[in-house]
Amino acid sequence: IVLAILIFTGLRAWNDITSPASADAEVIEVVGQQFAWTARYPGTKDNTLGTYNFKLIDPVNEFGLDLTDKNSYDDFKSLELHIPKGKEVLIKIRAKDVLHSLYIPHFRVKMDAVPGMPTQFKFVATKTTEEMRDELNNPNFNYEIACAEVCGQAHFSMKMIVVVEEEADYNKWKESQEAWAAQNSDYVKKFQERRQQAAVIN
């Protein structure tokens, strides 16, 4: 009986966090690799993540962005996960090398990051980082992502700060970020030149 109750409640929680997100949910991609997490956000121009292809990953194009997709050009990278308070957030998860597990203990959510198999979960943060610092009387408190899968010798260091802020502050932060394409303009220019040359040959 106890086992049946555990399975039932577990399935209910699983279905809740993995069911389709609302249309206005904030969609963010988090990529795991030995030994770090990296976030990719859609730009404010289209609010849509560009497509990717793992075959396009290289030392510069770390996300494997498909630059034939116009939605990729305003995506931006962050080494902190910023999310708005009180709004549904959908985290799309993938891994570049080995099995990882994205765990945010304060939000009671965890999901494996599996190479070749994108996963996701959704949640709503109800307290900002500042509110938690006041509540705990700890000015150094931070939410964080940890890796809950032993993924190598430096597994213990695979952490990422999570910043929960009011939606207005979150939107200001997004607007202040520079697109990946703008940071890597030479790479994008070479890609476009190769594409033009290929078009001429064909």
Image: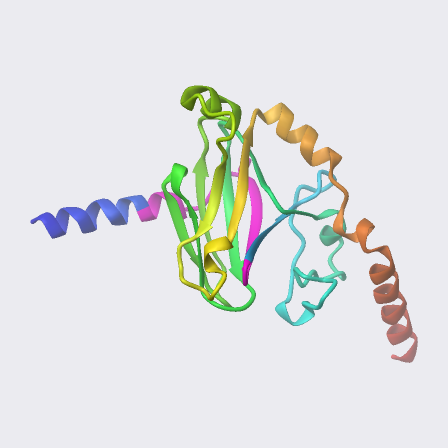
Q: Locate the C terminus and report the quarter of the image it occupies.
A: bottom right
Q: Residue at x 87, y 75 (%)?
A: 198
Q: Is residue 135 above or below residue 70?
A: above
Question: Residue 84 appears at what percent x and percent y?
Answer: 55, 31
Q: Is residue 103 above or below residue 128?
A: below
Q: Is residue 102 magenta?
A: no
Q: Residue at x 51, y 54 (%)?
A: 158
Question: Residue 177 appears at what percent x and percent y?
Answer: 73, 39
Quarter holding residue 57: bottom right
Instruction: Tell whether 10 sits left or right of 180.
Output: left
Q: Residue at x 76, y 62 (%)?
A: 68
Magenta stretch: give its range: 14-35
Q: Is residue 181 above or below residue 98?
A: above
Seen from the viewer's position, the closer of residues 40 and 100 is 100
Instruction: Tell whether 151 sits left or right of 180.
Output: left
Instruction: Tell whether 68 sits left or right of 95.
Output: right
Q: Furthest residue to the left?
A: 1
Q: Is residue 32 magenta?
A: yes
